[in-house]
Image (spheres, rainbow, N blue to C red):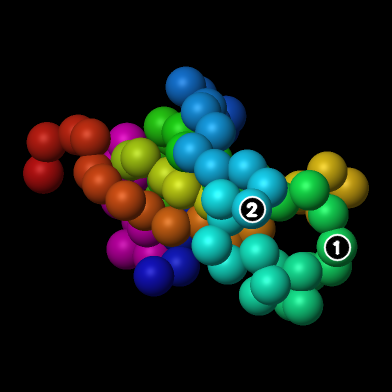
Amino acid sequence: MKFDVVGAIEDVETIAAGPSVKVRKFLRKTYGSGKWRKLKGVATVRLPNGRLHRVELHWYEAHGIGKRDFKIKGYLDKQ
């Protein structure tokens, strides 16, 4: 699902780093070599239908490469 992150990501936590990142080989092959980490946080996103939702996001990040492969893991607001 395509979506846009609106504003800042809050309550950022590292889930995995280094060898604990299971898809390291894919990330290195796709985006380049770096110290990959898997993170989670809370943000407001705009869905393709225009609605705004508060969600928990997971993504991968490496220094010099940036944030990649955002995934919505759960909706935190009432639907």
Residue 48 placed where, x, y %? Answer: 39, 65
Q: Residue at x 64, y 53 (%)?
A: 19
User: Callout 2, which amino acid?
Assistant: Pro
Label annotation for residue 19: 2
Left or right for 44, reference 5: left
Residue 36, placed above or below residue 78: below
Q: Secondary structure at mark 1?
A: loop
User: Callout 1, which amino acid?
Assistant: Ser
48 and 27: which is toward the camera: 27
Left or right for 20, reference 64: left
Separation of marks 1 and 2 at Cα, in angstroms? 13 Å
Local crowd at mark 2 within 10 Å, few (<14), some, or many (≥20)? few
Residue 45 placed where, x, y %? Answer: 42, 45
* Lower sequence index among marks 1 and 2: 2
| Rendered image quadrant of residue 53 | top left
67 and 52: which is toward the camera: 67
Q: Secondary structure at mark 2?
A: helix
Q: Which residues are magenta?
A: 47-54
Residue 48, placed above or below residue 45: below
Q: According to the image, label 1 marks what residue?
A: 33
Residue 67 shows in the view: no
Residue 62 placed where, x, y %? Answer: 76, 48
Check the image and name the residue furthest to the left. 79
Residue 11 shows in the view: yes
